[in-house]
Image (spheres, rainbow, N blue to C red):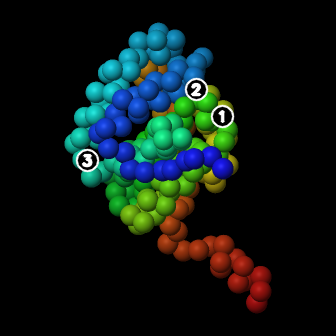
C-alpha cells in the first residue's frame, strides 16, 4: 500500500507546490507550449505566487495537496466557475491539477479530482468544468475517464508570444434531478 494522503494546503507548502508546478508543466506541456515560455518559468517566482495565494486565505479558491511518502507530490486547485458569473453558486471549476511526473499513472490524480468533486458537491455546486489544452491528449483522456465530457466551449489562452487552443469539459456532480433513477424506474414499471 502506498503512503498517500490528501489535505488542505497552507502557506508552508508554497515551495513544494512550486516544485511540482514547474516540474509537471515542463513535463506535460513539452511540445504543447512554447519552449521559451517553459524555460523561463522560475521556481522561486512560482513559490512567491503560491505563498501569496495561500497566505491570503481566499474564500473562493481551495487547494488540496497530495502527500506521497510525506512529500507533496501533487495538488488540485478549485473553486467557483469564473468564466460566467451567472453560474455563481451553481458551478465549480477545476483551476489546476498537477502531479509530479513520477506519480502519473498510479490513480493519484483521480484521487485528487474526486476530493475536489466531493468538496464542490458539499458546497452545493451542481456542475464542474475544467479547461484543457486542446492538444493535451493524456489530460483529455484523464478527464474523460472521470466522467467529464466536452461541452463545446473553446478559447485561446496566451503563453508568451503564442496563443494555444483550449477546450472545456463539464460534469454534473450534484444533479438537481436524478435522470438515471427516473430512467431505471421507467424500465421497472
Query: In the rendered view of the protein, which quadrant contains the C terminus?
Result: bottom right
Which SS class for mark 3?
loop
Image location (x, y in percent) of residue 67? 49, 43
In this picture, is 185 found above or below 13?
Answer: below
In this picture, is 19 found above or below 93?
Answer: above
Can residue 70 be seen? yes
* Of the pair 12 and 163, the residue shown nearer to us: 12
* Image-based side of 127 in relation to 110, left or right: left
Label 3 crowd (10 A; few <14 / some 14-19 / many >=20): few
Which SS class for mark 2?
helix
Return the residue at label 3.
58
Q: In the rendered image, which quarter is residue 114 located in?
A: bottom right
Q: Which mark is residue 28?
A: 2
- The residue shown at (53%, 27%) is 24
Image location (x, y in percent) of residue 143? 61, 45
- The residue shown at (40%, 28%) is 18
- The residue shown at (49%, 61%) is 118
Q: Earlier in the sequence, mark 3 or mark 1?
A: 3
Return the residue at label 1.
138
* Of the pair 117 and 80, the residue shown nearer to us: 117
C-alpha gap between disc 3 and disc 1: 31 Å
Q: Which mark is residue 61?
A: none
Amino acid at each position: 500500500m502506498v503512503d498517500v494522503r490528501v489535505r488542505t494546503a497552507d502557506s508552508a507548502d508554497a515551495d513544494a507546490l512550486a516544485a511540482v508546478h514547474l516540474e509537471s508543466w515542463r513535463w506535460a506541456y513539452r511540445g504543447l507550449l512554447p519552449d521559451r515560455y517553459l524555460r523561463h518559468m522560475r521556481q522561486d517566482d512560482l513559490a512567491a505566487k503560491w505563498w501569496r495565494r495561500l497566505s491570503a486565505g481566499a474564500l473562493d479558491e481551495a487547494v488540496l495537496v497530495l502527500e506521497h511518502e510525506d512529500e507533496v507530490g501533487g495538488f488540485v486547485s478549485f473553486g467557483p466557475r469564473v468564466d460566467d458569473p451567472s453560474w455563481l453558486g451553481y458551478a465549480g471549476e477545476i483551476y489546476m491539477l498537477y502531479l509530479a511526473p513520477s506519480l502519473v499513472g498510479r490513480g493519484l490524480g483521480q484521487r485528487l479530482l474526486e476530493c475536489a468533486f466531493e468538496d464542490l458537491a458539499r458546497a452545493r455546486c451542481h456542475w464542474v468544468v475544467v479547461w484543457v489544452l486542446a492538444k493535451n491528449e493524456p489530460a483529455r483522456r484523464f478527464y474523460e475517464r472521470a466522467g467529464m465530457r466536452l461541452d463545446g466551449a473553446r478559447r485561446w489562452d496566451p503563453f508568451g508570444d503564442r496563443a494555444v487552443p483550449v477546450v472545456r469539459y463539464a460534469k454534473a456532480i450534484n444533479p438537481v434531478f436524478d435522470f438515471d433513477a427516473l430512467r431505471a424506474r421507467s424500465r421497472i414499471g
